[in-house]
Structures are given as structure tokens and as C-alpha cells.
Amino acid sequence: MAAPVTARGPVRRSPSEEIPVTRPSLPPLAEYQALLPRLWASGTLTNGGPYVRELERRLEGYLPARNVRAVTNGTLALQLALRAVGGSKGVVITTPFTFAATTTALAWQGFTPRFVDIDRETFIMDPELASGQLRRDVVGILPVQVFGNPAGSRELAALANEGSRWAIFDSAHSFGVHVSGGSLFDFGDASILSFHATKSFHTFEGGAVVTPSARVARSVERLRNFGLRASGDVLDPGINAKMTEPHAAMGLVNLRYVDRWIRAREVRVNLYRELLGAVDGVEFQRVDATRRNFIYMPVLLPTRRLRDRVFRHLYRKGIRSRRYFFPLTSDFAFVPQTARGRFPVARDIANRVLCLPLYHELALRDVHRIVRCLRQGLG
């Protein structure tokens, strides 16, 4: 039986017990239960109830951001942002080194992806290469802040603005990340967040569209509720993407703990880096942020063969890791041949990256165990 999840500290486990690649951060159950009687008394479970509205206000202060609109999940957040900002056709510059949802959301909304390679150190879309692909058919840019790294975001937003194109940032990994000179969520026309259970902040499942534009915020409000206006008529071809009150209640409780959880993750990341710094051939992503959220622990191993060997060795030892992101989304079967390319840097990173276990309750002695097993796998 798995060890219980608490909000107090590391979960103790026997040396032979499996270590997952991640596990949800959960607050004390009693604090969540304390919010439920209000739901039973009011009978309001969805449709923009008081907990959703309060969560949006709290998030605007925490991030900080001007307009936060909570939705069902991060994928729908991206689809709504694309609809609200970009319409439903044209070519969009994006990256192949990302989770499937970035590329599938573009396809769902009728856009054609044009992939560009990434920077070797930051793993983020290379602004210079993106600039070289801004032809007349390009309507927008969709960068991804991979592993919570906002590197290049300011430059990419400016690049879109110069050509009167839109920029939407896939910030699914970037909750709690800060940059110098303003809010991360002032870049471009909109950003999206994921509040999936495995993220540093979650609402069980959920997401949000974050935008500096009041117009875009109003459009998202309609689109997440079937396109309905207050009068009852349908202005836009919307969808049902509303966050429910029980999900928002979890978010409100988790906001009390998220900074504590991020600090705990930082301790574990720093220990990983200290222990792995002495291992030949191991490289780390360069993250450009004034405050990080330590959402993942990606490492680069010397070759794909060694990466896969380490992956299998860790698995045999009861340690779950993840080849994240692999393969490139440009290799997906539904992607047109004309959109595929070599992308040598992205392909090299995808072939060598491995995300090691990381969550706020991960015992420090387990970090030592994981690194020992990784070194064994490298041989």
C-alpha cells in the first residue's frame, strides 16, 4: 500500500518501495472539507459560482496578472485562447519540443503548425529562427515555456507585435514563475496555465486563460459557457469549459500551501544538481527567471542509447522516470509532411532528456538512491 500523502513533510518509504516520477501535492483533508458545507447549503456547484470567482481574484493577486479566467483544464484553456485571440485559420509558429496538447490544440482549432527549432541551453523556441519563419501566411506565435522556463518570452512577444501578429504563451508549466521588469503574464495577448493534479499548483484538474486584455477575457468568459451572453443569446460558437466549485475550492486551499511546496521542491532540485554535478556527461537546462517553481527535474544524458539504458535500469530498481518530451510533436502521424523537418537541436534534446522523480514529499534519501541508480545505469 502506498504511503499516505500529507502536507507536513517527506513521505517515508522502505528502500524497496516504488518511487513514482511525480505525485500530487495535497493539503490537509480537513481544510478542504471545511469548504464543502457552503456548497451543500448554496446548491451552487458550477456556472461561475463564488469559489470560482474567488479563486480567479486570488490568482490575479498571486501571479500577478490582470485577468484570470478559470476553465476545466489546460488543454481547453489553450483552445479557448486560440479561439478568442487567433480565430481559426492560418499558420502558427510553434515548437516541436512540447507536450502533445500544444500541437493537438492547434489542429483542433484549424491552425497549421510551422515548427522551429529550440535553443540548446534553454529548450525554448529560438527567437532568431522564429523570426526567419515569419512569412505572410503566419498569423501568430505559440511559444512553450518548457519546464517553467520563460527564457525568450519577451523577445518572442515583441517579434509577434512587430508584425501585428498575436502571441499566446503555453505557460502550462509556469505557475509561480517570476521574471524581472513586470509580470510574466503581460507578455503577448494571452497565456494559459494547467492546474492538473501533478502540477506545482492544482485544482484536481483545471486550467486558466490569463490575459492583459479585457476584451480577450470577456471573449473567454463567453466561450467557456457555450458562447452565451448575459441576455441568453449565443454570440460565439462556444463550448462547456467551466471550472466547477469543488475544483475551485481545492485551488483555494492549495494556494495556502503552494509556496511551501515550491520551497520543498527547490531543496530537492538543489540536492539533485549537487549530486549529479560530479557525474560526467550529465547536463541541465538553463532557466532564466527571478523566481522558479521547480516543477520538473530534467537532465540530459550523453546519448539516446545511454538515456534509454538509464530509463530501463531505474525502472528495474522501482524508480519511475519519464522521457519528456519524446518523441517530437512534429513526428505525430496527423502532422502534414510539409510541416515536418529535421530540427536538430530539438531532436537531440528529445533523444537525451530524462525527467527524474520530483515532488515536495520526496524523501532526500530517495534522491540519493535515485542518483546512485542513475550512475549505475550509465555504467
Image (cartoon, rainbow, N blue to C red):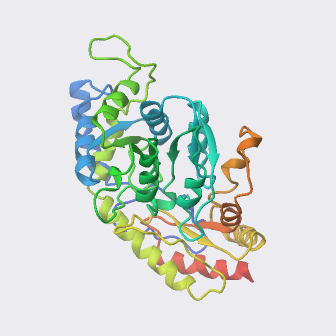
Which of the 4 image quarters holds residue 5? Answer: bottom left
Specify whether 309 is left or right of 231.
right
Which of the 4 image quarters holds residue 230? Answer: top left
- Is 319 drawn above or below residue 56 in the view shown? below
> Can residue 194 be seen?
no
> Can residue 68 be seen?
yes
Task: Name the quarter where the N terminus is drawn.
Answer: bottom right
Q: Nearer the viewer, residue 235 or 112?
A: 112
Q: Nearer the viewer, residue 336 or 23?
A: 336
Which of the 4 image quarters holds residue 39? Answer: top left
Q: Nearer the viewer, residue 5 or 97?
A: 97
- Is 92 drawn above or below residue 18 in the view shown? above
- Is 37 drawn above or below residue 319 in the view shown? above
Q: Residue at x 35, y 17 (%)?
A: 228
Task: Name the quarter where the C terminus is drawn.
Answer: bottom right
Q: Position of residue 284 (x, y in %)?
A: 56, 75
Q: Position of residue 27 (x, y in %)?
A: 33, 54
Q: Residue at x 61, y 56 (%)?
A: 97
Residue extending farthest to the bottom is 278
- Is 201 drawn above or below residue 336 in the view shown? below
Specify whether 287 is left or right of 58.
right
Q: Position of residue 177 (x, y in %)?
A: 36, 61
Q: Residue at x 70, y 58 (%)?
A: 343
Q: Position of residue 62 (x, y in %)?
A: 25, 53
